[in-house]
Amino acid sequence: MQFTDLGLAPEILRALEAQGYRHPTPIQAQAIPAVLSGRDVMACAQTGTGKTAGFTLPILQRLQTCKPASGASKPTTGRPPRVLILAPTRELAAQVEESVRTYGAHLQQRSLVIFGGVGMNPQIAALQRGVDILVATPGRLLDHARQGTVDLSRIEILVLDEADRMLDMGFIHDIRRVLALLPAKRQNLLYSATFSDDIRKLAHSFLHDPEYVESERRNSASELVQQTVYKVDRERKRDLLIELIRTHNWPQVLIFTRTKWG
Ligand code: AMP
């Protein structure tokens, strides 16, 4: 399959061509038609599968073909966002917005990323200038909502990206607060790398008859990586690690731990 088979606008195909992408990844091949159909989507997709373009491309297409409900007379300035993409971290939010810019380079849609830890004022000014696609972390978005500097009443499409990470980071209440500010009639897309009971519960609470798309076997491990498990008492973990590094003479090791302290 090629991107040209998916019914995307020539402007979008041009942007894809500039990236050198001709063939959709498996998740894109499933997600793009599902999103274009207007249905809610629940996608199981890890980073690196092309999931971002999987929702960005059809969203750009839908904005392009469906004019805002308020009619064509809406001025460019001050137009409220039609799409809201929530991401757990500022890095991810920035990355997603970068994708929107890349794939939407030849379209007129305006995008903006807002996250915490930086000043509100430039974000307020940008929101006032008008935005079509807003990418945000939940906390800062709620700050704007409380101050009345963002209008979420015209959102047509909501994306929760990396929903499992958002729940891990304790964003569930913020997500619920944001959901309460959106119009009831909208398209919802939920992306998650894992499907825990909590994710299922969240999904059932706001997705309507979703289409399920999956990038690969659920939570499958890469076949190129050899994995070995050592069962060891907590007190002896350090000794084991030292022993492994010594005996294998590993020059470079990446160690993941549960806590910073560890
Ligand atoms: P993601 O899973 O969304 O983080 O994307 C992983 C990487 O794959 C990004 O660097 C994308 O630019 C790239 N990518 C997305 N779609 C394609 C495609 N169809 N062909 C090749 N690379 C892609």
Image: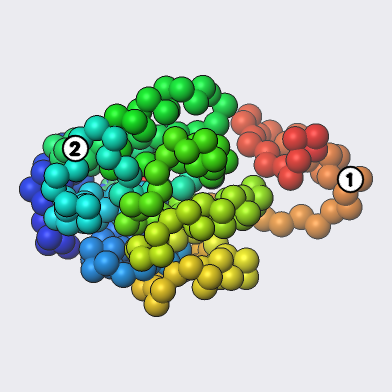
Pick the residue in front: 88 or 259.
Answer: 88
Instruction: State left or right for residue 105 relative to residue 92.
Output: left
Labels 2 and 1: the sequence-earlier one: 2
Pointer 2: residues within 10 angstroms few (<14), some, or many (20+)? few
**Residue 165 visible in the snapshot:** no
Q: Quadrant of the N terminus?
A: bottom left
Mark 2 falls on what kind of element?
loop
Pick the residue in front: 22 or 123.
Answer: 123
Spatial CA span between label 2 and label 1 = 66 Å
**Residue 33 visible in the snapshot:** yes
Instruction: State left or right for residue 164 relative to residue 235.
Output: left
x and y percent of residue 211 in the render?
36, 73
Pick the residue in front: 242 or 141.
Answer: 141
- For residue 75, the mark is 2
Quick check: marks 2 and 1 in contact, CB under 8 Å?
no
Pointer 1: residues within 10 angstroms few (<14), some, or many (20+)? few
Q: State whether residue 201 is above or below residue 45.
A: below
Instruction: State left or right for residue 135 relative to residue 235.
Output: left
Pick the residue in front: 115 or 221.
Answer: 115
The residue under the point 29% across, 29% down is: 129
The residue under the point 27% across, 40% down is: 79
x and y percent of residue 251 in the render?
63, 29
- For residue 236, the mark is 1
x and y percent of residue 110 in the render?
25, 36
Visual colour scheme: rainbow
Instruction: State left or right for residue 198 relative to residue 159.
Output: right
Q: Amino acid at mark 1?
A: Arg
Q: Is mark 1 within 8 Å of ligand 1?
A: no
Q: Amino acid at mark 2?
A: Pro
The residue under the point 22% across, 56% down is: 69
